[in-house]
Image: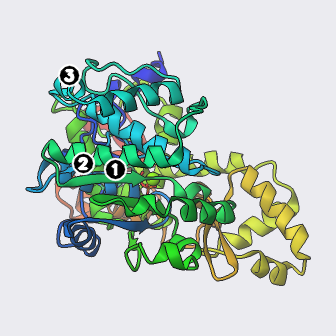
Amino acid sequence: MVKLAQDVWEIYGLKGNPFDVRALSLLQESLLPISKAFVGRTMDSKESMLITNILRNPGGACFVVEGEIGVGKTSFLNYHRFLWENEARDKLFTPCKEIGVALNWSLKDFLMAILDSLISKVVTLRNAKNIMKNSELLQEILMLSKVYFGKTLQIEGGVNGFHLGIGQNETVSVPDVSETRLLLYFREMVNQIKRLGYAGVFLHFDNMELLGKQGAPALRLFLENIRDTLQTSDVYFAFVGYRGFFSDIIAPLQRVRSIFFGYPINLAPLSQQEVVEAIEKRYQLLAKVPSFIRPVENDLIAYLYNIFGGKIRFIMDAMNTLIPNFPLPTPTTLKANIALELLGKMAQERIANLTKNERRLLEFAATKEAFTNKQLCQRFKMPAPNIARVLKNLQNLNLVYIGYSAGKYTYYKVNEEIRVIPRFSNTQRPDLAEKIMPSYAKALQTLTCVANHSFQAADYQHATQLPPSTCRRYLKMLVDQGKLQRLGQGRATIYKLA
Ligand SMILES: Nc1ncnc2c1ncn2[C@@H]1O[C@H](COP(=O)(O)OP(=O)(O)O)[C@@H](O)[C@H]1O
Ligand SMILES: [Mg+2]
């Protein structure tokens, strides 16, 4: 019987989903603690050296981390927040969760979100009760945040007895607290936090990448509005944005730019080896028993790495689509080429209902790393508004998304998920079987030695001159792949071309 979805990882001997695409978090009780699950981006990497230099400067700073969706921006910042909170000599106080910015935030929303995430962290400290008892300011901020976000915080509540999704919270008005007053609260709160033994505060604003494009004017206004707050002493403000965010949004704003670190920290994808390592680490962390079963062959991960341009989120997402949708009667490691075929089939279904035009455009677009409306106009001799309409549809179907912008152009990208269809891949694909299963390719080649007639294992070994164990493996593979038929049993087993 097929097990229910929630058990899906359990049947492999795993405590949870090894392909969980949520950013690695600072929450201690997480199944994948950042201290153990984080790979790559070592202290001597360009990005880690840069962020360390920025944070090492006393007094506070403002900076941007940029990169494509799914390369590991949020995790990267979380990792450094973790290090500065736990391993540094001069510790920085940092909220449990990154702060999500909503479009059209006012200065008041911004300040409230900061106060809320800070106070929510204070109440998780070991000596929270004492700290709160001795500070009227902190009590007041706690009250304010309760009223503003209409939620219940428990001072005693163990570590993270509550959840914060600041962007989504309904806000109720706090009529009589002015922005000036909130800013004062913030400054004073930072001072109190410092008195607890911290060198400063590290704030992480996470999803500017999601509101950046459509909301550029609103975003610029927002940054102008919060400019004074960004100059608060001893606070490090990190903003995560899409590739081009800094030059698009910040650079044109003279007054804002002057308080930001001069250029963004750029994150490139992890290397192929690091991605395999990250997933392998997750298996180890989640393994209930040493004999757990890998859901897919590592070869598949390496192969998807090339298709998805190295973006680890998409690689794991593919597995998330695949494994729960393909329940096996008994858990076994899914072969890379079978997995790839299944992924292709699922992706095909997603494009099955496209119009001819949509399909044409999508197919052309998929040959590009990124593309603009203009390029499609030129290629298809269609007016820009028509192209825009098709693009909008493809965006709504989640087949195309806005990648980044450069100058006045918006660069779109084809959703990585459909790149598993060979036609939609912009990478050269060598023969599938050979690339992902070199040994299978060899097994196929050796078959020619015994072509045309039925044979026994010993004939095969004689013809190929391979060691017996390799022969057994190849024969099994060829039978599994449907290339050979197996007749009879034991010593009498005969193989026939299928
Ligand atoms: N350095 C890393 N080591 C291990 N896993 C990582 C690393 N970077 C990212 N990941 C994993 O990849 C996925 C995407 O990372 P995330 O930080 O959310 O990317 P982004 O914020 O750029 O979209 C997450 O599941 C995350 O846990
Ligand atoms: Mg992110």
Indicate the position of residue 18 as horizontal and vertical percent values: 34, 39
The residue depicted at 43 percent of the width and 24 percent of the height is 329
Rendering coords of residue 222 (x, y %): 59, 59
Mark 2, residue position: 191
Please name the residue shown 87% across and 61% down the image: 356
Q: Which amino acid does label 2 sit on?
A: Asn
Horizontally, residue 156 falls left or right of residue 8, namely left
Left or right relative to 442: residue 110: right
**Residue with the mark numbered 1:** 187
The three-letter code of the residue at mark 3 reads Lys
Rendered view: 161 above or below 186: above
Locate residue 33 relative to residue 420 in the image: left or right: left
Label 2 vs label 3, nearer the camera: 2
Q: Are marks 2 and 1 in contact (CB under 8 Å)?
A: yes
N-terminal label among 3 and 1: 3
Q: Is mark 2 on a helix, strand or loop?
A: helix
Q: In which quadrant of the rendered view does residue 410 lie?
A: bottom right
